[in-house]
């Protein structure tokens, strides 16, 4: 029987090199040059393409004028999570994808990198570009310190509200701290952003899972409003034999381990099979490669055309040496105690299914085994249904996603707002940031209207 | 075969590119390197009684990441002795007999002092003299440089003293720090100058350091106004050159100077009447090697235009510069946007809307708003064409609107 092999051990130096920042900061010359390349389009398409509608030409012009503080202000006014977004946003399909330079067959402005310049300046110089308004008596509770919750809390704190965030994890930041690829943003970076939000007066209660001792209803009775951004729940299981063998794990757990331990102490298998081809699966594949795995094989039951992952992420994974096997579906994980291989069938594309994509069907007699030392799967993430079900009167959709009024993010429960992955099923940090901001503004309106205070005047 | 040979008032050089008087012509070592690289001539760094320079001497204006669009300096004339300079000039001339070597001079405004320096300079075998009437800083406080160049009578008088003894051609170098350069050129002509060269540097302060609140270049917490040159000054120089070229009271050869960095700049100076050109900042920026691109580009362009010699096109453009009152008021162009190459940045739209004549509208097509010129409202100002980042996307197209109506004619009709 095959013996489980671990990836060759990396020295701390090697590990450091492999996990190096994918976007090292621009020097002064570099950013002035890049900022000056921006055409300062009128009614610029990049603004429309940004889910938070940052006034991109304006923040870039300010960088060109060496006004990094003003630039950071413009960014944060639209996106309280401008820091992490600068690093983790899939800009090639958002702002940079809309840049008019693409039409001109020229490389688009590196908007993410420029945004990073302004935000790094804030974090390094440790100042607050948008200081809070005078304190208000109303209190708001936020469930979840992920991007959605943080964004909502930041906007409300700047308006003077007393905000408390309750979060189940040891550290705040949600997937920014525990999930996103570390060569885009490290947990340290995420925590710097959290610290800047704490400085606005937001209280963090980490390690508190709402729904256990404290319920959402308790929060609703003690606060003027409640926003929840609990994200999604656990990874969907594969549902095939052998899933409980040692060396088989969901991608989120695999990735979380690298986020909480020094990377040079984490050992991957020598051959790692990744099941699924979404962005999380690709993150896991690229992480396995960085941990030193000799072979990383991504299995997907459809083809490259149907993969949910971004093309750029796929291409970069290929460039880093990950192998993709299309039309390959696992049926059983092999091994005694520990994984030794994965049994697969070859698929072919049949008729279109409900999602409009051609449904993969097994090819008879195509079963084969891929020997491996680790299986990491990521085939989707559902909502934490027990948490949602316990909230009285909360309407969810077929998939368990929370229903909200798109204009205000208010749920079917009055004064309870929601946003982020729990309403969209898993999009990006920037969408969560936008939801949090919209909810915060709606909460502010709601409170002011209830008091009959004119919108444009705050009071203490 | 294209012949780049140039002739300024009888001073011949293998090509029209001379080094202007300045740091690149400080020493024999530099000028030899320049001639080896292919420069046609050199005007020596201005010779006179040695001065002392300050430390921290230059500052510049960058534009959109482009360094030194404009250069400012507070340097004075040479800080080496007259003997050292003249010895090296003599040596250079001996080694490079076919290149133009000119001695730039600035001395006290005394007849015998000028007589003496002219004689000593000509003893070197140099091809000509350039009288520095232009230096706008430092030297002018001592009654020299632009202090002379700004007063026609002084310029005429000193040129006259020089001509009393000079055997080689005399070039008067003019300052742009005057409201109209023509009276000075006329004065130099009356004084007997064989040519004029222009422009020298323009009085300037390039900016203020917003941390220290002192402008650059800073000398122990203070600065002094300097002289501005480099690409930024070219339009000013071109205008001054063309105004002298068109002036019947100053029928005198011109050596064009100011912001020349590309062969195109040189071609423009020559088209507007210069017999040759001089370059300083571009060499300070890129070194002598840039001469290769200058001569090569100019020759290729001349060939494509069928010009065999510099004389074939010198001054050809002068007569197209006329009085505003003679411009045809019935002539009309309108902007035309090419949808195929338009990248939809809408810069033309906002420029016309806020900065011109509200003649571009945004029209929805394929889910997007695109700029479209309203022909009847467009006045043909060119602004949109100028701001459009895509070459050739916005063209100004002539429309038939009659011919020959000018302001002058309208006035004449009213009066008559
Ligand atoms: C592996 C991975 C990589 C990703 N990479 C990117 C990327 O590169 N770029 C990008 O834009 N997006 C990326 N995303 C998506 C992005 O991370 C999410 O869209 C975003 O984090 C959603 O924010 P959220 O606030 O809704 O949820 P989360 O970030 O999931 O935060 C939810 C928080 O709520 C807490 N919580 C949950 N339930 C409770 C409860 N009952 N009581 C108290 N606290 C609770 C959780 O502990 C967590 O801290 C990635 C996602 C994954 C999984
Ligand atoms: C640092 C510096 C020193 C100069 N010194 C002199 C000088 O001694 N005599 C002179 O006639 N012009 C001097 N000039 C002016 C140049 O000869 C030239 O007229 C001017 O710089 C414009 O040309 P450009 O734009 O090619 O530099 C100097 C210019 C610079 C930048
Ligand atoms: S030429 Fe001037 S007036 Fe005409 S459309 Fe362009 S900017 Fe407007």
Image (tube, coloured by chain):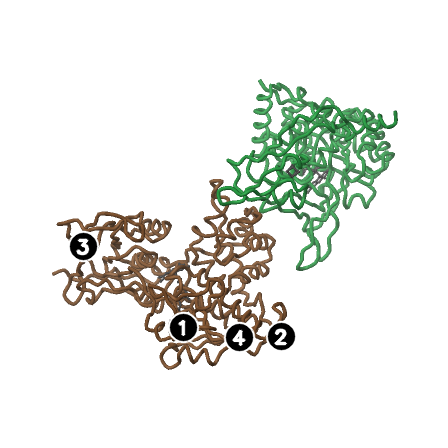
Chain colours: A brown, B green
Secondary structure of residue under mark 3:
strand
The answer to whether residue B322 is left or right of residue A374 is: right
**2 or 3: mark nearer the eye:** 2
N-terminal of the pair, mark 3 or mark 4, is 4
N-terminal of the pair, mark 2 or mark 3, is 3
Q: Are marks 2 and 4 on the same chain?
A: yes
Is residue B69 placed above or below A399 in the rendered structure? above
The residue indicated by pointer 1 is: A171
**2 or 4: mark nearer the eye:** 2
Near mark 4 (Cα within 10 A), the count class, few <14, some 14-19 or many ≥20, is some
Q: Nearer the viewer, residue B71 or A228?
A: A228
Is residue A251 placed above or below B271 in the rendered structure? below
Quarter-wise, where is residue B388 in the image? top right
Q: Chain of mark 2?
A: A
Indicate the position of residue B229 as horizontal and vertical percent values.
69, 41
N-terminal of the pair, mark 4 or mark 1, is 1
Query: Is the C-beta separation of discs 3 and 4 under 8 Å?
Result: no
**4 or 1: mark nearer the eye:** 4
Near mark 3 (Cα within 10 A), the count class, few <14, some 14-19 or many ≥20, is many
N-terminal of the pair, mark 1 or mark 3, is 1
The residue indicated by pointer 3 is: A344
Indicate the position of residue B33 as horizontal and vertical percent values.
59, 34
Confirm if mark 2 falls within 8 A of ligand 1.
Answer: no
Q: Quadrant of the N terminus of chain A?
A: bottom left
Is residue B207 placed above or below B11 in the rendered structure? below
The residue indicated by pointer 2 is: A459
Q: Nearer the viewer, residue A355 or A264?
A: A355
Indicate the position of residue B338 as horizontal and vertical percent values.
54, 34
User: How far, Cα to Cα, is label 4 from label 1?
Assistant: 17 Å
Secondary structure of residue under mark 2:
loop
Which residue is at 44% across, 55% downward? A23
Q: Chain of mark 3?
A: A
């Amino acid at each position: 029987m095959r013996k489980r092999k671990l990836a060759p051990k990396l020295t701390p130096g090697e590990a450091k090199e492999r996990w190096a920042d994918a976007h090292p900061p621009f020097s002064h010359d570099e950013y002035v040059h890049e900022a000056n390349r921006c055409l300062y389009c009128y009614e610029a398409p990049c603004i429309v393409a940004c889910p938070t509608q940052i006034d991109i030409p304006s923040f870039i012009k300010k960088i060109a004028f060496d006004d990094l503080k003003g630039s950071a202000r413009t960014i944060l006014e639209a996106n309280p999570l401008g820091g992490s977004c600068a690093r983790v946003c899939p800009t090639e399909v958002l702002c940079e994808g809309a840049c008019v330079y693409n039409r001109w067959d020229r490389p688009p402005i590196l908007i993410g990198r420029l945004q990073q310049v302004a935000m790094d300046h804030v974090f390094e110089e440790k100042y607050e570009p948008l200081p809070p308004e005078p304190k208000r008596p109303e209190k708001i509770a936020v469930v979840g310190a992920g991007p959605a919750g943080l964004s909502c809390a930041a906007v409300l704190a700047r308006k003077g509200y007393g905000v408390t965030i309750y979060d189940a994890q040891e550290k705040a930041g949600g997937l920014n701290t525990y999930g996103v690829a570390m060569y885009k943003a490290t947990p340290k970076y995420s925590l710097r952003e959290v610290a800047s939000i704490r400085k606005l007066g937001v209280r963090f209660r980490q390690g508190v899972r709402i729904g256990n001792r404290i319920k959402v209803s308790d929060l609703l009775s003690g606060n003027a409003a409640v926003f929840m951004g609990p994200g999604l729940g656990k990874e969907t299981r594969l549902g095939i034999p052998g899933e409980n063998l040692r060396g088989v794990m969901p991608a989120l757990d695999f990735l979380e381990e690298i986020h909480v331990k020094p990377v040079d102490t984490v050992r991957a298998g020598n051959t790692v099979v990744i099941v699924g081809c979404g962005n999380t699966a690709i993150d896991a594949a690229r992480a396995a490669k960085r941990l030193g795995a000799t072979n990383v094989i991504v299995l997907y039951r459809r083809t490259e055309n149907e993969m949910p992952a971004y093309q750029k992420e796929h291409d970069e994974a290929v460039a880093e040496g990950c192998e993709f096997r299309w039309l390959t579906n696992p049926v059983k994980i092999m091994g005694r105690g520990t994984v030794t291989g994965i049994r697969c069938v070859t698929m072919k594309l049949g008729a279109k299914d409900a999602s409009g994509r051609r449904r993969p069907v097994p090819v008879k007699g195509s079963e084969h085994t891929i020997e491996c030392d680790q299986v990491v799967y990521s085939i989707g993430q559902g909502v934490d249904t027990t948490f949602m079900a316990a909230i009285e009167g909360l309407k969810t959709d077929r998939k368990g996603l929370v229903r909200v009024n798109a204009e205000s993010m208010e749920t079917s429960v009055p004064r309870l707002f929601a946003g982020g992955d729990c309403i969209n099923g898993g999009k990006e940090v920037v969408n969560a940031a936008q939801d949090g901001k919209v909810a915060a503004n709606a909460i502010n309106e709601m409170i002011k209207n209830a008091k009959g205070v004119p919108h444009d005047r705050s009071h203490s | 075969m294209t012949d780049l040979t140039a002739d300024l008032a009888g001073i011949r050089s293998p090509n029209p590119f001379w080094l202007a008087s300045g740091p690149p012509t400080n020493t024999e070592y530099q000028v030899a390197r320049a001639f080896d690289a292919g420069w046609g001539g050199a005007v020596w760094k201005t010779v006179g009684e040695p001065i002392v320079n300050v430390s921290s001497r230059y500052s510049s204006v960058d534009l959109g990441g482009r360094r030194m669009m404009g250069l400012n300096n507070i340097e004075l004339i040479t800080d080496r002795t007259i003997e050292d300079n003249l010895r090296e000039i003599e040596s250079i001339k001996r080694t490079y007999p076919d290149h133009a070597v000119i001695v730039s001079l600035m001395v006290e405004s005394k007849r015998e002092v000028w007589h003496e320096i002219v004689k000593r300079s000509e003893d070197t075998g140099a091809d000509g003299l350039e009288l520095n009437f232009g230096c706008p800083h430092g030297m002018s406080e001592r009654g020299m440089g632009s202090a002379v160049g700004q007063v026609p009578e002084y310029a005429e008088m000193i040129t006259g003293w020089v001509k009393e003894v000079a055997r080689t051609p005399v070039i008067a170098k003019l300052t742009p720090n005057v409201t109209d350069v023509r009276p000075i050129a006329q004065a130099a002509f009356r004084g007997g100058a064989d040519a004029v060269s222009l422009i020298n540097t323009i009085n300037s302060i390039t900016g203020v350091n917003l941390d220290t609140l002192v402008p650059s270049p800073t000398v122990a917490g203070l600065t002094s106004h300097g002289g501005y040159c480099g690409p930024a000054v070219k339009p000013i120089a071109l205008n001054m050159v063309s105004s002298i070229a068109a002036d019947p009271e100053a029928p005198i050869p011109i050596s064009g100077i100011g912001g020349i960095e590309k062969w195109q700049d040189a071609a423009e100076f020559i088209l507007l009447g210069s017999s040759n050109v001089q370059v300083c900042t571009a060499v300070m920026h890129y070194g002598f090697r840039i001469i290769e691109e200058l001569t090569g580009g100019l020759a290729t362009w001349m060939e494509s235009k069928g010009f065999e010699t510099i004389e074939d096109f010198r001054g050809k453009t002068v007569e197209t510069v006329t009085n505003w009152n003679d411009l045809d008021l019935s002539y009309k162009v309108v902007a035309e946007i090419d949808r195929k190459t338009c990248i939809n940045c809408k810069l033309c739209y906002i420029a016309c809307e806020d900065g011109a004549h509200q003649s571009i509208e945004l029209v929805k097509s394929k889910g997007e708003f695109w700029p479209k010129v309203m022909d009847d409202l467009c006045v043909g100002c060119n602004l949109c064409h100028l701001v459009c980042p895509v070459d050739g996307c916005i063209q100004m197209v002539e429309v038939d609107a009659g011919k020959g109506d000018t302001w002058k004619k309208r006035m004449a009709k009213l009066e008559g």
